[in-house]
């Protein structure tokens, strides 16, 4: 059976100043799969994610989201697409001036004509999914980091999106909450057949949730495949990354000049 | 050469920023006019919230400033006018001076310091914590959602504040006239309004509308352009207040000039 492509990145290049952050990324992501993008800090994963949701435009190349070329869309058409996607931010990005309930209900209040009583029920359902029902009236500042992230996730799925993007969903969380979030991502994609794109460098969560994994390195896709193929990859960079070893082809030291010369200069 | 380069880059940056602020202004007007047609207007509660914050919240401090300014003008002009035995002219001095000039300008400066700074700090911290981007991703235009309510609130509330400020300032001058200069209260008030024309009041109000546009646009622009964490928010806020102050004085001069030269 032909798999339906929901996201296609075609030779995406992005430069910040002279530095090329994305160096010609090519990727297809299929409907209903959980696709993990991993890579070291500064390899361009978050930048790439921002291209997929249309927050950044590539210098060259094309991004197709749900069959539409994002580089050519008008702002109105872009908004139509945006209503079909959800994004969970690394910092949760909750609106500080609104309660938890208002945060989750905001897209519903703005984009639908649902009655307030219906919206209240939807909000309770979404918060139940992330295990935070009953927290509607708290302010984001009263929540812990993990709880904020879960509220952010509830907000991302409030409009029943077709695709959900996660930027480092488990970073900075304790292992149990991280496990809960991983399970939630799996549940969403299996039960509601949502396509999930997860950017992370948490190896444990990569191998527990991914259908396919892409490893990004220096703005390029180094390797794509099932978690098994990535695990058994012959590429020393991939192996070093999975093992988390300080020695290998990827150098921790990024200084260009000689250490001794620099000291006595 | 180095100085020339610096001068050039300053000119280029400034002109780019002017274009960007104008673009923000026109986009705000676009959402004000076409938003309701697209059935995507700003929620009324958000406008009311901003109105209460910008207007009612600034009332006491604006009134305080105007009241004491009225007293000061009365005392300063009495000092001069007493030599000619023209103490009664303190009254129009205070009322006309406040309505035309000091009421709008001082109130605008107070509001720029209080509300403009708050706008930049709030939008700026939303920007650095990805909240502005989150709005966009939810298909909520940040200009419609954040800028339009603040713009509308200031454009409506600043002229109202100015009317209050004018009245409080006249009251301050009245107290000096009656209790210190021993002028007849009735005569003082008659003189206050005899020399004040409607034109003085509405030119003052036109000024205040222009100042409201300046404060809200600069505040929102600096907020949306913020980057670099908490330090960036602080810098943006300072820059927003300083820029608003300079532009308020500049626009005051331009608008006064227009009225001065066109009435001839």
Image (tube, coloured by chain):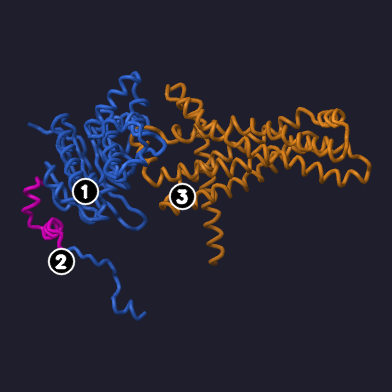
Chain colours: A blue, B orange
Q: Which mark is residue A71?
A: none
Mark 2 or 1: in front is 1
**Frontmost residue, A88 versus A101:** A101
Find numbered disc 1 in the image and state the secondary structure of the residue it sits on. Answer: loop
In this figure, which residue is indicated by the disc labeled 2? A247
Q: CA distance from mark 3 to mark 1?
A: 30 Å
In this figure, which residue is indicated by the disc labeled 3? B233
Q: Which residue lies most toward the bottom here?
A: A264
User: Do labels 2 and 3 touch, CB within 8 Å?
Assistant: no
User: What percent of the width, then of the height, locates residue A145?
Assistant: 29, 45
Magenta highlight range: A225-245
Q: Do the residues at discs 2 and 3 belong to one chain?
A: no
Q: Which mark is residue A174?
A: 1
Q: Main secondary structure of the magenta part?
A: helix
Which residue is located at x 24 percent, y 39 percent? A165
Q: CA distance from mark 2 to mark 3?
A: 40 Å
Locate the C terminus of chain B by quadrant.
Answer: top right
């Amino acid at each position: 059976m032909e798999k339906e492509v929901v996201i296609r990145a075609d030779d995406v290049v992005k430069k910040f100043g002279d530095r090329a952050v994305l160096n010609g990324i090519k990727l297809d992501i299929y409907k209903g799969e959980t696709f993990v993008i991993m890579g070291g800090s500064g390899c361009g994963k978050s930048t790439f994610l921002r291209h997929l949701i249309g927050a950044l435009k590539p210098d060259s190349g094309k991004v197709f989201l749900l069959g539409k070329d994002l580089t050519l869309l008008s702002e109105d058409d872009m908004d139509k697409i945006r209503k079909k996607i959800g994004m969970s931010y690394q910092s949760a990005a909750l609106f500080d001036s609104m309660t938890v309930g208002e945060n989750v209900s905001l897209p519903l209040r703005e984009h639908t004509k649902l009655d307030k009583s219906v919206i209240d029920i939807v909000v309770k359902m979404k918060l139940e999914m992330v295990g935070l029902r009953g927290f509607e009236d708290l302010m984001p500042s009263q929540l812990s980091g993990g709880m904020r992230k879960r509220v952010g996730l509830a907000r991302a799925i409030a409009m029943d999106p077709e695709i959900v993007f996660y930027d480092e969903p488990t970073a900075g969380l304790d292992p149990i909450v991280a496990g809960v979030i991983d399970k939630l991502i799996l549940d969403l994609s299996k039960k509601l057949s949502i396509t999930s794109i997860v950017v992370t460098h948490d190896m444990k969560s990569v191998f527990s949730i991914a259908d396919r994994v892409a490893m990004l390195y220096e703005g390029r896709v180094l390797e794509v495949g099932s978690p098994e193929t990535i695990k058994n990859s012959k590429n020393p960079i991939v192996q070093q990354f999975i093992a988390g070893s300080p020695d290998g082809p990827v150098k921790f030291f990024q200084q260009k000049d000689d250490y001794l010369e620099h000291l006595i200069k | 050469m180095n100085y020339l380069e610096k001068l050039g880059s300053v000119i280029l940056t400034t002109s780019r920023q002017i274009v960007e602020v104008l673009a923000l202004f026109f986009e705000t007007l676009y959402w004000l006019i076409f938003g309701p047609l697209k059935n995507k207007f700003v929620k009324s509660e958000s406008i009311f919230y901003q109105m209460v914050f910008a207007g009612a919240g600034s009332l006491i401090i604006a009134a305080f400033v105007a009241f004491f300014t009225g007293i000061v003008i009365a005392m300063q002009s009495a000092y001069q006018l007493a030599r000619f035995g023209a103490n009664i002219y303190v009254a129009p001095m205070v009322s006309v001076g406040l309505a035309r000039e000091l009421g709008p300008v001082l109130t605008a400066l107070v509001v720029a310091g209080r509300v403009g700074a708050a706008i930049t700090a709030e939008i700026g911290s939303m920007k650095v914590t990805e909240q502005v981007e989150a709005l966009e991703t939810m298909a909520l235009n940040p200009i419609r959602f954040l800028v339009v309510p603040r713009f509308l609130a200031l454009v409506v509330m600043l002229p109202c504040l100015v009317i209050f400020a004018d009245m409080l300032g006249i009251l301050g001058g009245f107290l000096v006239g009656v209790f210190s200069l021993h002028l007849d209260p009735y005569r003082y008030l008659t003189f206050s309004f005899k020399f004040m024309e409607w034109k003085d009041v509405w030119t003052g109000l036109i000024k205040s509308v222009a100042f409201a546009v300046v404060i809200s646009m600069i505040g929102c622009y600096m907020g949306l352009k913020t980057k670099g964490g908490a330090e960036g928010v602080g810098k943006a806020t300072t820059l927003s207040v300083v820029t608003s102050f300079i532009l308020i004085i500049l626009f005051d001069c331009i608008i006064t000039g227009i009225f001065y030269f066109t009435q001839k």
